[in-house]
Amino acid sequence: MALFGTQRDVSLFRGLSRELMWDIISQQCAYYQLISEQTKVNIYGEAAGSKYYNGPVLLNTLIERGDNSSPVDDFGVSFDRPMTFRFLRDDLLGKNPIYSNGAFSNAFSNAFSSTSNPSPTADSGNYPGTPYGADIVPEVGDIIMWNNSYWEVDNVNDNQLFVGKDPAYPYDVNPLNPGLENYGSNYSIICTAHYVPADKVQITRERL
């Protein structure tokens, strides 16, 4: 049976992480979710016309800034700067999930639940009266604005596990280590992105 990584331990690290990200480092970005149903694409998967987004949503993040580069293509010299945005996974959950028959009533919280079978005493990290819960599922193609510049998400990773355990996969029934659904946590969402000019994003008018 596991000895460390209980939900009490997870709650402690969640609180420390929020204090670090919200009150000490305080890096923020604006997140725009691409509405794929309304954005028409051509046979190459490129948006042929206007792009549509939900947002922006202001999020606390840890930013890893890459170096500027000036790649040369068929159109001349351009600009690029890779970026990595790290989010606390619990901050992206739906607001104030309500437990009903052993499962979250919020569909998003079902998809990103901290346990496969949450109980009424489970600590989801989102509480009434708090700003937690952006209700966002990051996806490739979303736009992140930071310092009045835009980055398009290339890849999304959510495999940073607390004590190496993901409670969504406890391998029930486990006679050697029962109750693993109550240990560990899938802790963060990490988005890698590339720079994209504002006129291609089409969020603001850049040209007449």
Image (cartoon, rainbow, N blue to C red):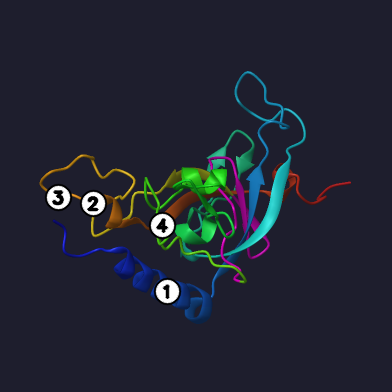
| Label drawn at residue 15 | 1
Q: Amino acid at mark 1?
A: Gly
Q: In the rendered image, which residue does mark 3 sit on?
A: 177
Callout 3 secondary element: loop
Q: Earlier in the sequence, mark 4 or mark 3?
A: 3
Dot 4: element? strand
Residue drawn at 45 percent across, 45 percent down: 156
Asked if the residue under mark 3 is in contact with the one under mark 4, i.e. CB atoms within 8 Å, the reply is no
Q: Looking at the image, can residue 86 be seen?
A: no
Secondary structure at badge 2 equals helix
Distance in Å between CA atoms under marks 4 and 1: 14 Å
- Residue 181 vs residue 45, the one in the foreground: 181
Using the image, determine if residue 118 lies above or below residue 132. above
- How many tags in the picture? 4
The answer for how far apart the CA atoms under marks 2 and 4 are is 20 Å
Q: Which residue is mark 4?
A: 188
**For the residues carrying marks 2 and 1, which lies nearer the camera in this image?**
2
In front of the other: label 3 or label 1? 3
**Mark pair 2, 1: CA separation:** 22 Å
- Cα separation, mark 4 vs mark 3, equals 25 Å
Seen as rendered, the residue at the extreme bottom is 24
The outermost residue toward the front is 101
Q: Nearer the viewer, mark 4 or mark 3?
A: 3
Tag shown at residue 180: 2
Q: Which quadrant, please, contains the N terminus?
A: bottom left
Q: Earlier in the sequence, mark 4 or mark 1?
A: 1
Q: Tell which circle, 2 or 4, labels the residue nearer the N-terminal end.
A: 2
User: In the image as oriented, which residue stretches furthest toward the left?
Assistant: 176
